Image (spheres, rainbow, N blue to C red):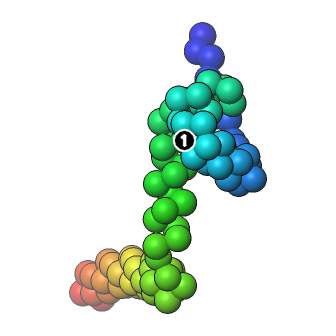
Amino acid sequence: MTISKTRKQYTTEFKEEALRLASKVGTTKAARELGVYQSQIYGWRSAAQKKASTSKRESGLATENARLRRQLAEQAEELEILKKAATYFAKNQK
């Protein structure tokens, strides 16, 4: 019998407050007061810095790139299906 733990999800407001507290009193003390791991605060800090450094244009391009990759994968799959169907029907014509 296995017991699966679910991850605790923190709100954006909680993360922002934790980062403010960590900048005032230090990461170790803030983590202890909030009952979270130091690594979580460090991760939240790096994510916030990354988000602040990427411009709207870059994030828009990344979104467009992801959409185009999905579309390309779908079309490649459709092409593969059509190739298989063509070989199947070519065999049955003989």
Question: As displayed, is residue 59 above or below residue 42?
Answer: below
Q: From the viewer's perspective, is 15 left or right of 67?
A: right
Does residue 25 show up?
A: yes
What residue type is disc 1 on? Ile
Residue located 54% across and 36% down the image: 26
> What percent of the width, then of the height, locates residue 24?
61, 43
- Quadrant of the rendered image containing residue 5: top right
**Depth check, front residue: 29 or 57:** 29
Q: Nearer the viewer, residue 83 or 27?
A: 27
Determine whether, in the image, residue 77 is placed left or right of residue 6.
left
Q: Could you say which is closer to the camera, residue 37 or residue 4?
A: 37
Where residue 82 sits in the image (x, y, percent)? 37, 84
Going 46% across and 73% down the picture, which residue do you hit? Answer: 53
Q: Secondary structure at mark 1?
A: helix
The answer to whether any part of residue 85 appears in the image is no
Residue drawn at x 53%, y 36% is: 27
In the picture, which quadrant includes the N terminus?
top right
Residue to which mark 1 is pinned: 41
Query: How far from the left and from the top, in percent, is residue 60?
Result: 52, 85
- Residue at the top extreme, as displayed: 1
Residue 67 lies, with reference to residue 7, above or below; the image says below
Q: In the rendered image, which quarter contains the C terminus?
A: bottom left
